[in-house]
Image (cartoon, grey):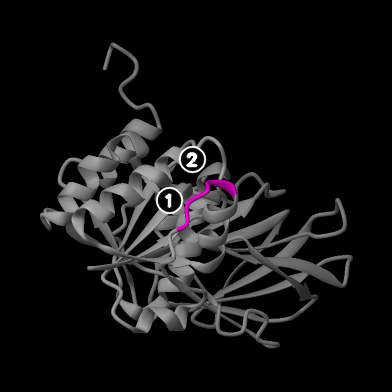
Amino acid sequence: MRIAVYGKKITKQNTPVFKQFLALIAQYGWKPVLEAELQEQLEKKAGLAIGAETFSSSSDFKSGIDVAFSIGGDGTFLKTVSFIRDSGVPILGINTGRLGFLANVGSEFLEEALDLVLKKEFEYQKRSLLRVETERKLFGDENVALNELTVHKKDTSSMITVHAYLEDKYLNSYWADGLIVSTPTGSTAYSLSCGGPIITPGCQVHILTPIAPHNLNVRPMVVPDKMPVRLMVEGRERNYLISLDGQSKSLKRGEEVVIHKADYMINVIKFEDNNFLDTIRNKMLWGIDRRN
C-alpha cells in the first residue's frame, strides 16, 4: 500500500511521533510517499535518511496513493486536503497539536489507529467543500475550502458592510467586522468562535456567521448548500481581506464573491469508537459536570 504523509513542521515534541509512525509503516510493509519539504525536515532535524518518494502538488495524487496521513493539527489537516482535492484519496488525521476537531486521533493511539487501517476496520465519512469564484480569480485553481471562506476588514478599525444574496435574492447587509460562510466541517472552526452553531458533517448546508455584528439582532443563519451565496463588500477602505481556509488575498471594494458547494467531497477515515459526536463531546468538555 502506498501512503502519502504530510506534516508542517518537525519539532522536538513531534519527532518521536514521526519516528514511531515511520517504524510502524515499515513493519506493515507500506510504502511512504512524503511531502517534499517534510522529507527534507526529517533528514535535517530528525536525522532520518528515508529516501522515499515525494509529492509537492495535488497532481501527484493522481497516481496510486491509497491513503493520506496528516500528522499535526487541524491546519495541517486542511493543507493535506488541498493536496488531495478531487483524487478521492481518504485521509486520516493524527493529532500532535492541542484541540484537533479534524486531526482527532491522538498520537498516543497511533499504533491502534494504524492497526485498524491495516485491518480495514474503518468507514469513510464524506465531507463537503466550498468552491469560490471571484472576478479576478484570486485563488486560481486552489479555490476550494473544507472549513470556510471569510471576508473581513483589513487596514482599519471601522466596520464594513457585507451585502449577501442567496440565489440572487437579497438576504441582508451585514454591518460587522466581517462574514464567515462555512461548511458543516467548518462549523467547529472560526464560525464556532463567533457564536455559530455546531453542524454534523452529513448535513447539506452552509452557515453564514457574522463577525462581531453591530446590530445584535443579526444572528448566524443556516442555508441549503445547493443555494449559491453571493457577497459584495463596502466600507471606507478600498481593499479588504478574503480568506479561504487560512489562505488570504486582498479583495477590492465592490468586487463580487460567489460561493458554491464543490462538485466533489473528501473521504475522512473514521473508526467505530471515534466518531464526530464523541469528538465534540470530548473537545467541548460536555458532561464534565457530575450532575450530568
The span shown in magenta is 45-49
Give the x, y percent position of residue 193: 55, 42
Vertical order, 88 against 126 (above or below) = below
**Residue that mark 2 sits on:** 14
Q: Which residue is depicted at the point 79% across and 77% down? A: 252
Q: Secondary structure at mark 1?
A: strand
Helix, strand or loop for the magenta stretch, by majority: loop
Real-space Cα separation, disc 1 to disc 2, in angstroms = 9 Å
Dividing the picture into quarters, in which one does residue 126 lie?
Answer: bottom left
Looking at the rendered image, the quarter that the C terminus falls into is top left
In the rendering, at what x and y percent does residue 26 appear? 27, 55
Q: Is residue 262 magenta?
A: no
Quarter residue 134 falls in: bottom right
Tell me, yes or no, if residue 54 can be seen here.
yes
Which kind of residue does numbered mark 1 sit on?
Answer: Ile
**Disc 1 residue crowd, few under 14, some 14–19, many 20+, Cα 10 Å:** many
